Image: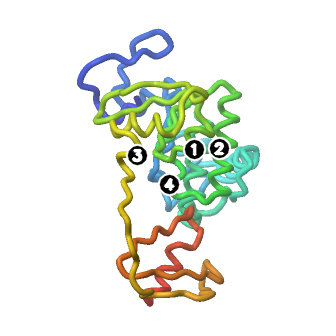
Amino acid sequence: LTGVMPRTSGDVIWEGKPAALATPHEAMALGINAVHQEVVLCRHLTVAANMFLGEEDSRFGILQQRAMVRQAQKIIDDLGFDLPAHVMLGDLTIGQQQLIAAARATVRGTKFLIFDEPTAYLTRKEADQLFTLIRRLKVEGVTIIYISHRMEEVFELADRVSVLRDGTLVGTRNIAETNDAELVKMMINRSIEQVYHKEHFTPGATIVEARNLSGKGFENVSMSVRAGEIVGLYGLIGAGRSEFVTTLYGR
């Protein structure tokens, strides 16, 4: 749909007419854009330069850097992102870079915007900012495809959900008329009860225990792990998971 991959058959109808979508440039010219899971911007350029990459403000062949910074900052501020436009993109966190990628996609005459796992590297605060932007775009009439394996995000944002399995469309449901169990069954072709079969397990003695452990990025964490036990450690990017476990094994 964005012109990155060639089709092998079928047609894409855009505003009532067939569209070739042979290149990303052609897709963007029509108003089709995407925010990818991996940031595909230039980390060695400023935030402002990335915002207007390919559409730079220049006079007599000279880039108007200050004007672009002012314009980019206004766009970022209007979107509610507390980020500076004058710094190098590489100086921001991956999550902040993702927000800049989203901001960039909104200023290019976008009519149809695809988000591909956009929260993979976002903190909860950053994800909330992104969701606010998505809702705003919807009100402004932008059509959105939101790709995610995180069920809670789909139910929070979507009006309809379509499920693909092995490259084939399994079905489409109105969000108000479906639930987690139905979508999981559509995705894996069996019920949740068949997936999560729990056997009786008697754990062994405690092998490692943390008591009020603190370090860079986390504090006062207490937990224990017993022999033969699998412990899941969950949290968003920036929650302190990696810092905690790397402290445990002595990095």
Distance CA(mark 4)–CA(mark 1): 12 Å
Amino acid marked by disc 3 = Glu
State which quarter of the image contains the C terminus.
Answer: bottom left
Instruction: State the count of labels.
Output: 4
Q: Earlier in the sequence, mark 4 or mark 1?
A: 4
Q: Which residue is mark 2?
A: 131
Q: How is the image coloured?
A: rainbow
Do the numbered discs 1 and 2 sit on residues whose CB atoms are within 8 Å?
A: yes
Q: Earlier in the sequence, mark 2 or mark 4?
A: 4
- Secondary element under disc 4, as helix, strand or loop, is loop
Q: Position of residue 60 (x, y in %)?
A: 59, 42
Q: Earlier in the sequence, mark 4 or mark 3?
A: 4
**What residue appears at the point 42 percent right and 15 percent down from the top-left corner?**
13
Q: Position of residue 106 (x, y in %)?
A: 61, 37
Crowding near the residue tagged with mark 1, few <14, some 14–19, many ≥20 C-alpha atoms within 10 Å: some
- The residue mark sitting in front, 4 or 3, is 3
Q: Is residue 242 above or below residue 133?
A: below
Residue 201 seen: yes
Amino acid marked by disc 2 = Phe
Amino acid marked by disc 4 = Ala
Distance CA(mark 4)–CA(mark 3): 27 Å
Amino acid marked by disc 1 = Glu
- Secondary element under disc 2, as helix, strand or loop, is helix
Q: Which residue is mark 1?
A: 153
- Quarter holding residue 158: top right
**What residue appears at the point 68 percent right and 48 percent down from the top-left corner?**
72
State which quarter of the image contains the N terminus.
Answer: top left
Q: Which residue is mark 3?
A: 193
Q: Which residue is mark 4?
A: 120
- The residue mark sitting in front, 1 or 2, is 1
